[in-house]
Image (cartoon, rainbow, N blue to C red):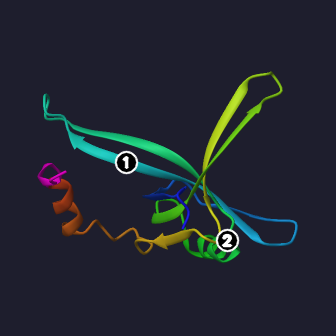
Amino acid sequence: MSAYLNQVILIGRVGKKPEIAKTHDEKKIAKFSLATSEHWIDKGTQERKEKTEWHRIVVYSSKIAEVIENFVDEGALVCVEGKLKYEKWMDPQGVERKLTTIVVDLNGKFMMLERKKTAQQVDSPDKLQIEENEDDIPF
């Protein structure tokens, strides 16, 4: 077993319909943005606060990319397990650019956590109950 680990697990909502591309050998790749959010109640003002982080996801597993192509739309709640990849380069104007990507390859995982919603469906009472009791979480 290795003493090193590069592993990321994120649960969030897909930002927009995933892009599907093909490699030179016709394997599918999926790319999409994933939003993860934190919610809390400000102790001083009692206001509900939220902070959202956006993550760039690239899926190199052709089988997972095919599932994403057929079943994942904007707003879908998903879980991805992959690894961090950092890139750094100079743009044509000489400005250093940085990009962080979550890579889901053959060792990664992808799970859909809810079915597609129709216009008539609403959030379940259980979900609303969990959000109302956030301050009761013991950690």
Which secondary structure, mark 2?
loop
Quadrant of residue 66 within the rendered picture: bottom right
* In the depicted structure, whether residue 68 falls above or below residue 44: below
Where does residue 105 sit, x and y in percent of width and height?
A: 65, 66
The residue carrying pointer 1 sits among few (fewer than 14), some (14 to 19) or many (20 or more) residues within 10 Å by Cα, namely: few
Quadrant of residue 120 within the rendered picture: bottom left
Which secondary structure, mark 1?
strand
Q: Give amino acid for label 2.
A: Ser
The residue carrying pointer 2 sits among few (fewer than 14), some (14 to 19) or many (20 or more) residues within 10 Å by Cα, namely: many
Count the numbered circles shown: 2
Q: Of 128 and 112, which appears nearest the observer?
A: 112
| Region rendered in magenta | 133-139
Is 138 contained in the magenta span? yes
Q: Of 84 and 125, which appears nearest the observer?
A: 84
Residue at figure coordinates x 72%, y 26% from the top left: 96
Checking the image for residue 78, the label placed there is none
- Badge 2 is on which residue? 61
Q: Give amino acid for label 1.
A: Ser
* In the depicted structure, whether residue 9 falls above or below residue 54: below
Residue 137 relative to residue 51: left or right: left
Q: Of 24 and 3, which appears nearest the observer?
A: 3
Where does residue 44 sit, x and y in percent of width and height?
A: 13, 28
Residue at figure coordinates x 50%, y 63% from the top left: 80
Where does residue 135 sit, x and y in percent of width and height?
A: 14, 48
- Badge 1 is on which residue? 37
Residue at figure coordinates x 46%, y 65% from the top left: 78
